[in-house]
Image (tube, rainbow, N blue to C red):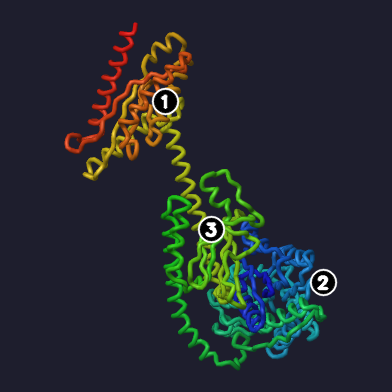
Amino acid sequence: MPKKIALFSCGWAFDLLHDYSKGVVKRMQGLDVDLYMFVCYPPYVESETRKVGELNIFNLPYIEDFDGVLILGNAIDHVGVFESIVKRCNDAGVPVVSTGRKDENAYFVGSDNYNGAKELYTHLVEEHGISNPIFIAGNSNNDDSNTRLDTLCEVMRKHGIPADSIEVFCSMWEPRLTVEFIHERFGNRNVDLPDAFICANDNLAIAVCLALEEIGYEVPSDTIVTGFDNDYSAEIYSPSITSVDQRFIDLGAYALRLLLDVVDGNKRNHEVYISCEMFASESCGCSCMRDLDYLRRMQGKRLFYDRMMTTIFERNVSMIEEEALSGVSYEEFVANLKRAFPTDTKFIGDTFHLVLEPGYKKAMSNVNTKLRTKGYSKKMNVVFSMENGKVVDVPEFESRKLVPYSDPSKKNRVFVFVPLHEITDNYGYAIFGDNVDIVGNGNHLFEFISRFDVILSKVRQNISLRFLNKKLIELTETDVMTHVKNRAAYENKEAEINSIIRSGARVSFGIGVFDINDLKKMNDSYGHEAGDAYIVNCCSVLCNVFSRSPVYRIGGDEFAVVLQGEDYLNRDKLLAGLKARIEDIADTNPPPEAKVSIAGGISVFDRNTDDSFEDVFARADAAMYEDKQKIKSTKEKML
């Protein structure tokens, strides 16, 4: 039985997550270990409700089912979330290793942020003479961001520069907010630039460079910009960003190594640090030791590939959306998805599962259904399941198992779980199998999941509206007293069949016309309440006899039955059965309101003589009146 390792992370820092998870997977090779990654994209600055929907994926796994847990802690900045995962691990007695964020109840593997930042900031002061920088921070409660700021203050004080000369802008890790800050502060060019923008990560550094360029400044001639993390995008950017490599591939590998040692009962140091490496580059005015021309040429080639893959991605998502929205029921929606997904697996991979909450289906037929907002149902509906490129039929499974189907012969499995939801309403989750690179393609993964959330919301809305419309039509087409179809429904059926007749298509149908006898006498003698009961009794008999055909109340005492299928073929037998049933009821000598007396006639459509539905009705109506006269004549003879 392979060891099960869970990994929790937010996905926005996808370069870091990708490198870290690659390191974990690299370390797994040759070991009997499977990795389960729980990834989400909660916003930092938007409403709390969407955060709830995203972060709910962390509630999916039962921690006690795992041998160990990894947390990419510096990617989880939302209040209480990191601490909650650590507590769940402690409560379950499962060892946990965090990277980038410390907790006294978790082992820690991290990069030596302090010495990496110290080397960078010492370089800026001693080589470039900075003295009045702006520090672009992440979140105020983020350990990495705070360590870098504290180190900057320390370095400046050591060089005789007051630390209070540092202005701090809290970006919440949002490049957009950083761009807005630059434009608001320096856009009119009446305010002097600082001698450096020192950023808590590379994405913020690139955002600063872009914003400065938009308002007419150049880096590094007008000011210095530095980052942190040494992302590939920062490396090839022009100017290439001076940064610090935290060696996340090595961090991932070492974190798993430490965790497995603890799982096996070996004693390990509670904290382990890996040294960082500074890369001075163009954004601070230094010459880069790497071959940037080669890297940028390779990026030019990669751009063409990425553009091609984006086109494929957009086409596939659009096709999935078109197929999903074409269904008029939940069952059609599922069938259409099964047809759409396997057509191109370049993005989703050969192993992909789509799992939905049972409440999602229920909400389509009951708008009052409350979907879950925390956790997942015990039983889940499997909408789509593909393993190794083969579609597998798994209609339902227990969410605790996490994956609907897994090939037991495969080793070193990697499963990436992402949430599906509308704001706080939990729809379910998607699973990408054996495709760790999916988290490195973070923009596409986020876009795919976001688009699919919208698709699911549209499908839910469309089908529920269809259901409500159907119910509304049923209400408008239902007779209040007898609960059979009313005159409006009858006229719609008449129009439908007339359309078929006019089209020349083959159609076989008959019409039965029935009239309740002596209704006026019943009302006059026993009152309208007894008359209503009489109508309901007669209607019930008609429905029981013509059980496979729609019955319509087309007047106060008049009913019509449109005969198709078996009732059409057995019409004469059914009419005789109606007569026999009426006689049986009469033999019981029921009270007046329980009596049943109906005159009726049936006629069938003849393509050679009939031009419309009305032609058939007219003959059936005439046959009904003929039967009525016979019944009346029989009664008179008995008197």
Q: Which mark is residue 218?
A: none
Q: Quadrant of residue 193?
A: bottom right
Judge by depth and name the residue closer to the eye, 391 or 128: 391
Amino acid type assigned to the residue bearing label 3 in the image:
Pro
- Residue count near mark 2 (Cα–Cα under 10 Å), binned few <14, some 14–19, many ≥20: few
Position of 474 compared to 202: left or right?
left
Q: Residues within 10 Å of mark 3 (few under 14, many from 20)?
A: few
User: Which quadrant is the N terminus positioned in?
Assistant: bottom right
Res. 224 visible in picture? no
Residue 219 picture location, percent across and down: 58, 82
For label 3, the residue is: 395
Image x and y of residue 462, in percent: 46, 50
> Who's the residue at 53% across and 58% down the image?
395
Identity of the residue furthest to the left in this view: 608
Q: Quadrant of residue 516?
A: top left
Nearest to N terminus: mark 3 or mark 2: 2
